[in-house]
Image (cartoon, helix red, strand yellow):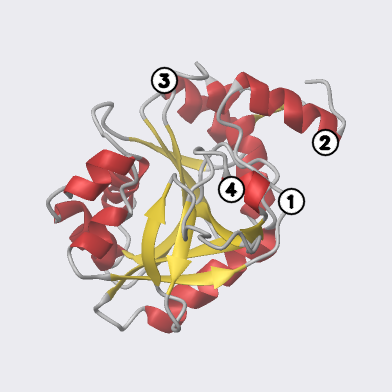
Amino acid sequence: MIIIPARIASTRFPNKVLTPIEGLPMVVKTAQAVQEVDDVAIATDSTKVQQIVKSYGFDAVITSPNHKSGTDRINEAASLLGLSDDEVIINVQADEPFIEKQIIKKVQELTIRNKNNYLVMLNSAYKIINKDEAQDPNLVKVVLNTNEHAIYFSRSIIPYDRDGSNISYKAHLGIYGYTKKALKRFCTLPHAPLEEIEKLEQLRAIYHGFIIAMTEVQTNSFGIDTPEDLEKAKKIYNFSS
């Protein structure tokens, strides 16, 4: 099951999830991009969003407006949808209308391989970027161990290239895979100091000793977090609204 959290409020981009992308609301465009991989449901706090996505044939559930993160919203949605504890859930952000389905499939396959490993709480993906791209604090960087498990995530450039050797960096993609029971476990963990400092909730899992398994992907897609991102997408994908 793919669950897309779609909160209507956004401080940087109000009503972002309903912004037209090639004639479709952004959340619908995202759902259509991934629907060949698995069943899709939208978790929202807005009856307007629910009605719109249902008019395009997608399931949608109303969740609490008080959730602090999309992960908490998905956790509630998984219960409302009656999913079993062993169900593999893929969290795809509503602001990824150009995400490639093969990326979702790769995270799904990784999650299935790890579903019986209690220590693997989250599964996710990264892409290779250059040093100039790594300067952007909105592009989260990750460092891995030899098993492709995340050691740390940061908005800062990591690792620090002391010798100036012009190394490549790994950018984290905000796509997660987990079983329902692992998702519930994550949402019951106490928030971590590092999570609060970086404003990156995935650090909670690492802080408490759990594993985040990663897989490398190639993608041209990017999240549309701001009106500036939307203008960038219009130029890249050649659409006006």
Amino acid bearing label 3? Ala
> What whole-number distance in Å separates the C-alpha atoms at marks 1 and 2?
10 Å
Q: Is mark 2 on a helix, strand or loop?
A: helix
Residue projecting furthest to the front: 163
Q: Which of 215 and 53 is in front in this view?
A: 215
N-terminal of the pair, mark 4 or mark 2, is 4
> What whole-number distance in Å separates the C-alpha atoms at marks 3 and 1?
27 Å
Q: Which of 130 and 61 is in front in this view?
A: 130
Q: Residue 134 carries which label?
A: 4
Q: Which mark is residue 82?
A: none
Q: Nearer the viewer, mark 4 or mark 2?
A: 4
Above or below for 144 versus 238: below
Above or below for 229 versus 215: above
> What whole-number distance in Å separates the C-alpha atoms at marks 3 and 2?
26 Å
Residue with the mark numbered 1? 220
Residue with the mark numbered 3? 9
State if disc 2 and disc 4 touch (CB < 8 Å): no
Q: Nearer the viewer, residue 210 or 167?
A: 167
Q: Is mark 3 on a helix, strand or loop?
A: loop
Residue with the mark numbered 2? 236
State if disc 2 and disc 1 touch (CB < 8 Å): yes
Dot 4 crowding, Cα within 10 Å, few <14, some 14–19, many 20+: many
